[in-house]
Image (cartoon, rainbow, N blue to C red):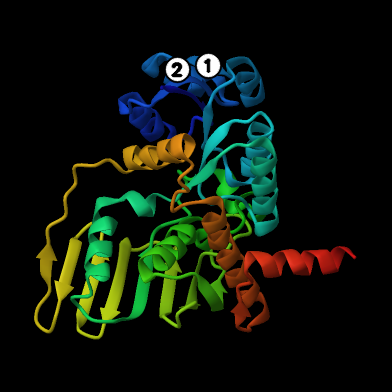
């Protein structure tokens, strides 16, 4: 069976999704919508699709089996709830939503509408990360003792769309956007949900009302400590995650590869690069729709990433360590707040 898919949003990442759909035997892209109709029409011409200026009209007319949502963060909840009400399955770009309350709305709408939703945390599908996970899970470097994740990137580039620099639309700055990747990587490769956060941020950005960098000390449910450090200021880019074991160190750097030291100099670990991350992501979505096998990037898991980011900001605001509440704790607190 081939599932008919529409793309909601025609931004920079849309082409990656459409290319993966073009090559996937279980899916067929049929239409794309974007408020910038020329952008939708451009993609439609390349991939043989129908173009729309309004995603609601597209979903109503096309009645797709699934939708891939690649809209700005502040539109995720609205589009996902709309699609869920029509029984449409979804691949929703990360982060799942602006906050956990919006995540819960999406989850509730999905359950009510019978749609299956996964979130595009692509860290789970990158070849270098999969290779790192194999080393971590093998135990050959001993016990994982700590994680250091560093991301330096000129976040305030003029090429970045204005909405990224409005907290109300983006959820925050570099820690909300690139931080979602880092939190996901630390949780997934570290083998547990983050439960405690202590953070501080800096606000020297040149655009908008969002932070320009920050450092967070994180602890997962098994007591594993991790440090997340991100800078959006100009300088040489860096994207590196170090896994410190009792018997060595594993360094993961997309530019430099995967390297390991078990007491001596670092040596490279070969990484297979055959599989495309967006294709692997679609494989997960296909299994979920067809068999009901929940993907690693489930709604509950993706909500947990948003919850950690929320507590990073709260810790920075209060200067205190914050506990990341579980879904059950959050629902109980919300019931008490309401009445």
Q: Is residue 173 above or below residue 157?
A: below
Identify the residue at the far right of this view. Answer: 339
The outermost residue toward the front is: 291
Q: Earlier in the sequence, mark 2 or mark 1?
A: 2
Q: Which mark is residue 51?
A: 1
- Note whether 265 is above or below 82 in the view shown: below
Note whether residue 254 is visible: no
Q: Does the CB distance between marks 2 and 1 fall below 8 Å?
A: yes
**272 left or right, relative to 179:** left
Q: Nearer the viewer, residue 54 or 203?
A: 54
Residue situated in front as seen by the camera: 111 or 96: 111
| Whole-percent x, y for residue 6 in the image | 51, 25
Q: Is residue 115 above or below residue 180?
A: above
List the residue tagged with mark 2.
44
Q: Judge left or right: residue 122 versus residue 41.
A: left
Residue at point 76%, 68% (across, down): 332
Task: Please provide percent x and percent y for residue 266.
Answer: 12, 74
- Classify 10 Å Cα crowding around label 1: few (below 14), some (14-19), many (20 and above): many
Q: Is residue 15 left or right of residue 318?
A: left
Count how many numbered circles sit on residues in the image. Answer: 2
Residue in the image at 69% along x and 47% along y: 108
Disc sitting over residue 198 in the figure: none
Q: What SS does tag 1 mark?
A: strand
Give the position of the C terminus as an image quadrant.
bottom right
Residue at 16% of width from left, 72% of height from top? 260
Q: CA distance from mark 2 to mark 1?
A: 6 Å
Task: Label 2, secondary structure: give it.
Answer: helix
């Amino acid at each position: 069976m081939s599932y008919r898919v529409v793309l909601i949003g025609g931004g920079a990442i849309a082409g990656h999704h459409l290319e993966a759909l073009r090559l996937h035997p279980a899916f067929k892209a049929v239409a794309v919508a974007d408020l910038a109709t020329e952008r939708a029409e451009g993609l439609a011409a390349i991939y043989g699709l129908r173009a729309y200026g309004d995603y609601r009209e597209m979903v109503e007319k096309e009645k797709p089996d699934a939708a891939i949502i690649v809209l700005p963060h502040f539109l995720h909840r609205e589009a996902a709830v709309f699609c869920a009400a029509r029984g449409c399955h979804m691949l929703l770009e990360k982060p799942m939503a602006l906050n956990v309350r919006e995540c819960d709305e999406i989850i509730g709408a999905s359950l009510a509408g019978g749609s299956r939703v996964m979130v595009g945390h692509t860290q789970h599908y990158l070849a270098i990360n999969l290779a790192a996970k194999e080393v971590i899970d093998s135990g050959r470097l001993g016990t994982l003792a700590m994680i250091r994740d560093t991301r330096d990137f000129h976040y305030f580039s003029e090429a970045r769309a204005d909405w990224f620099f409005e907290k109300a639309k983006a959820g925050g700055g570099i820690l909300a956007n690139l931080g979602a990747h880092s939190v996901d990587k630390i949780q997934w490769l570290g083998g547990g949900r983050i439960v405690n956060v202590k953070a501080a941020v800096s606000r020297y950005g040149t655009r908008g009302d969002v932070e320009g960098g920050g450092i967070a000390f994180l602890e997962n449910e098994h007591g594993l400590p991790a440090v997340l450090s991100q800078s959006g200021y100009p300088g040489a880019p860096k994207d590196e995650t170090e896994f410190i074991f009792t018997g060595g160190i594993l360094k993961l750097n997309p530019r430099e590869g995967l390297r390991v030291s078990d007491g001596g100099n670092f040596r490279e670990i070969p990484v297979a690069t055959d599989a495309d991350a967006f294709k692997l992501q679609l494989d997960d979505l296909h299994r979920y729709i067809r068999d009901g096998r929940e993907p690693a990037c489930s709604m509950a898991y993706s909500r947990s990433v948003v919850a950690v980011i929320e507590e990073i900001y709260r810790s920075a605001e209060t200067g205190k360590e914050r506990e990341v509440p579980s879904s059950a704790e959050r629902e109980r607190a919300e019931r008490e707040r309401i009445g």
